[in-house]
Image (cartoon, rainbow, N blue to C red):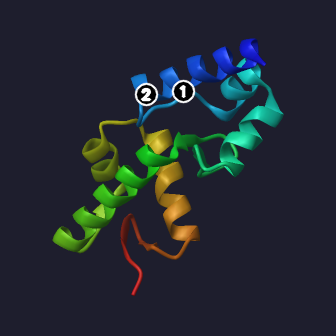
């Protein structure tokens, strides 16, 4: 319906305003309802990287590409380096890195991450 669509558009504007520091899953659910958040993830508009953190899929892909590029260049990166690279907070950088670890893209080695071979 129109009201729900307007709420979804407003939510997506919040993601656009701060792509690497978006609203939390709880904030999204409070704004548009849990079923709408699930639908946005299932449709591919949002990508969940943890129970608390979702990114617009295009932003997630851009972040992952930046991390991969930094890893190809440097060999390894720390959480702090990723946080600074993305201009985000530790919370979002950590959620992204743990997600990339779970996908087998990266692996943790001490305090750093490297591309998984």
In this view, the residue in front, 57 or 23, is: 57
Q: Secondary structure at mark 2?
A: helix
Circle 2 residues within 10 Å: few <14, some 14–19, many ≥20 = some
Q: Which residue is mark 1?
A: 12
The relative height of residue 11 versus residue 102 in the rendered view (above or below) is: above
Asked whether residue 1 is in view, the answer is: yes
Q: Is residue 49 left or right of residue 88?
A: right
Residue extending furthest top?
3
Query: Does the CB distance between marks 2 and 1 fall below 8 Å?
Result: yes
Residue under the point 82% across and 35% down: 35
Q: Is residue 75 left or right of residue 67?
A: left
For the residues labelled 2 and 1, the Cα–Cα distance comes to: 6 Å
Residue extending furthest front?
1
Quadrant hosting residue 109: bottom left
Residue under the point 35% across and 51% down: 62
Give x and y (percent) for residue 14: 50, 21
In this view, the residue in front, 48 or 114, is: 48
Query: In what quadrant of the picture does the N terminus appear?
Result: top right
Q: Which residue is mark 2?
A: 16
In this view, the residue in front, 43 or 56, is: 43
């Amino acid at each position: 319906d129109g009201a729900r669509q307007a709420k979804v558009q407003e939510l997506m504007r919040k993601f656009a305003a701060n792509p690497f520091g978006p609203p939390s899953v709880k904030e999204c659910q409070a704004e548009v309802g849990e079923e709408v958040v699930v639908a946005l993830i299932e449709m591919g508009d949002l990508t969940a990287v943890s129970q608390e953190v979702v990114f617009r899929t295009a932003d997630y892909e851009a972040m992952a590409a930046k991390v991969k590029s930094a890893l190809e260049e440097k060999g390894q990166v720390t959480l702090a380096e990723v946080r600074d690279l993305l201009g985000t907070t530790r919370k979002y950088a950590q959620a992204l890195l743990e997600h990339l670890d779970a996908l087998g893209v990266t692996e943790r080695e001490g305090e750093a991450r490297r591309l998984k071979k």
